[in-house]
Image: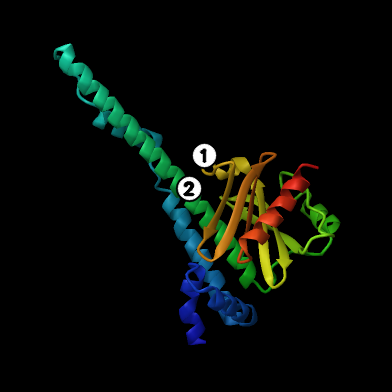
Amino acid sequence: MDQWTEKLDVYLDGELPASEMTAVQEHVRGCSGCTADVLSRVQMKRAIQSAGQRYSPSAEFRQRIRQQISPPSQRAPWRIWVPAASFAILLLFVSLTFVTMRQRQIASQHLYSEIADLHVSMLASANPVDVISTDRHTVKPWFQGKLPFTFNLPELKDSDFTLIGGRVAYLEQSPGAELIYQIRKHQISAFIFQDRAMGSGALGDSLARRHATFNVESWNQNNLRYFVIGDAGAKDIQNLANLLKQAAQQ
């Protein structure tokens, strides 16, 4: 028990080798004590992340900083004043651009950390889905009335994927759909949320990345934000993403 407990924090941070990651996942699914421990730690991480967001700088604070770094007005010959003012404006522009880019980077990292935690919670849960079915025509209607939007699911008949089921997930306090797919021995979470709930400018239109242990594909379509995450290969993640994109066009 102790040897597994010592690995849980590294497991949640996605820093375990792939072979050990699979072993820990299998152990957690069969050990009620470790399952409860993982869920508790994920909840604590999300609480800490949420608390950190409460202290983001307000618009009034940023305005005061702009005023403080602006050069004081002083009378000087135009040949001296113009270059100094130009430099100050350039410096202010660069500073604001850096702050904006940094804020977007932090927002993006926060969202991907939340998505990874939701996926890990599903893997560790004894009841990972609220609706169990391999039929999209059963899963999709289940979400009606539970979410403020609708979505389409792909036909998997000629693919290697199996739809295990789904459940309602929450990101940034907004409800969305978490769909669990399986390919070979890997489970993949596909999340669908309203794009406006993600915050303005937090993510680009399309993004594929590696989140330590997990491969992630994310994009915007029909005012919805999609995330596909799992420890399956990047090609499998991309193939599932393509199926969801095609379904959304129907």
Q: Inspect this view and state whether residue 151 appears.
A: no
Q: Position of residue 120 (x, y in %)?
A: 59, 67
Q: Inspect this view and state whether residue 24 appears.
A: yes
Task: Confirm or deny contact between disc 2 and disc 1 (CB under 8 A).
Answer: yes
In the image shown, does 114 or 146 lie closer to the viewer? 114
The kind of residue on which mark 1 rests is Gly
Q: Is residue 153 left or right of residue 168?
A: right
Q: Position of residue 173 (x, y in %)?
A: 58, 50
Residue 75's place in the image compared with 46, above or below, is above
The kind of residue on which mark 2 rests is Ala
- Mark 1 sits on what residue? 201
Q: Residue at x 46, y 56 (%)?
A: 49
Q: How is the image coloured?
A: rainbow
Q: Position of residue 81 (x, y in %)?
A: 19, 17
The numbered mark at residue 107 is: 2
Q: Position of residue 62 (x, y in %)?
A: 35, 35
SS for tag 2? helix
Q: Which of marks 2 and 1 is nearer the N terminus?
A: 2
Residue 24's place in the image compared with 192, above or below, is below
Residue 1's place in the image compared with 11, above or below, is below
Residue 74's image quarter?
A: top left
Quarter that holds the C terminus: top right
How many labels sit on residues?
Answer: 2
